[in-house]
Image (spheres, helix red, strand yellow):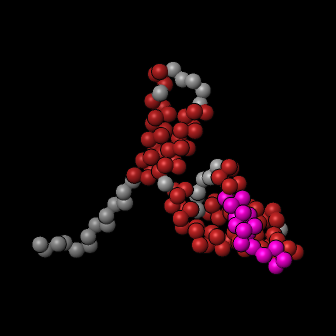
């Protein structure tokens, strides 16, 4: 049950297509444990701690999930991912700098796409 509890946030994030670094995932879980240590009553949940932790995590995601979603989908996080990709690639010649920049542009272009306005079914008389 404890393993299920620890992996539950990953399924929530995966369903929404939210990438997150392992350090940020650990921080998310540690913050929930810290909240339980501050505000929880150990005598109430001692025998059922994995279930209590799961409920606390699920309640937190129900309450703060939209804020987390907006934060992780922010362009700032995508730029950090691009920076990580660029740093992890081996040293390139000066002529090969266009490829990673084009890849970065492709990632950013997805966010900047505008939805097409639906065409009017009737003509406008004015």
Instruction: Classify residue 97 as left or right of residue 4.
Output: left
Residue 59 percent location from the top left of the image: 66, 74
Image quadrant assignment for residue 43: bottom right
Q: Tell me if I can see residue 54 in this picture.
A: no
Image quadrant holding the C terminus, namely bottom left
Residue 124 percent location from the top left of the image: 17, 72
Q: In the image, is residue 42 part of the stretch drawn in magenta?
A: yes
**Residue shown at the point (85%, 73%) measured from the top left:** 46
Identify which residue, 43 or 82, lies in the foreground.
43
Q: Report how many numbered discs are placed on residues in the image.
A: 0
**Residue shown at the point (56%, 62%) measured from the top left:** 68
Identify which residue, 99 or 58, lies in the foreground.
58
Extent of the magenta region: 28-44
Q: Tell me if I can see residue 71 in this picture.
A: yes
Instruction: Classify residue 121 as left or right of residue 51.
Output: left
**Residue shown at the point (51%, 20%) measured from the top left:** 93
**Residue shown at the point (59%, 31%) measured from the top left:** 89
Residue furthest front as drawn? 38
Examine the rendered structure and indicate whether residue 112 appears above or below residue 2. above
Examine the rendered structure and indicate whether residue 91 appears above or below residue 34. above
Instruction: From the image, give the main secondary structure of the stretch colored magenta.
Output: helix
Residue 1 percent location from the top left of the image: 83, 68
Residue furthest bottom as drawn? 44
Q: In the image, is residue 35 part of the stretch drawn in magenta?
A: yes
Instruction: Classify residue 116 as left or right of residue 13.
Output: left
Image quadrant assignment for residue 84: top right
Examine the rendered structure and indicate whether residue 38 appears above or below residue 81. below
Image quadrant assignment for residue 119: bottom left
Residue 75 percent location from the top left of the image: 47, 50
Examine the rendered structure and indicate whether residue 115 appears above or below residue 85. below
């Amino acid at each position: 049950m404890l393993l299920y509890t620890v992996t539950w946030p990953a399924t929530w994030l995966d369903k929404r297509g939210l990438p997150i670094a392992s350090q940020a995932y650990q921080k998310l879980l540690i913050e929930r444990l810290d909240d339980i240590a501050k505000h929880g009553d150990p005598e109430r949940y001692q025998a059922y701690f994995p279930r209590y932790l799961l409920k606390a995590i699920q309640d937190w995601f129900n309450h703060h999930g939209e804020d987390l979603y907006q934060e992780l989908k922010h362009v700032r996080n995508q730029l950090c991912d691009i920076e990580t990709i660029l740093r992890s690639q081996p040293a390139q010649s000066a002529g090969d700098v266009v490829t990673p920049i084009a890849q970065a542009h492709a990632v950013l272009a997805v966010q900047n796409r505008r939805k097409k306005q639906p065409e009017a079914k009737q003509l406008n008389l004015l």
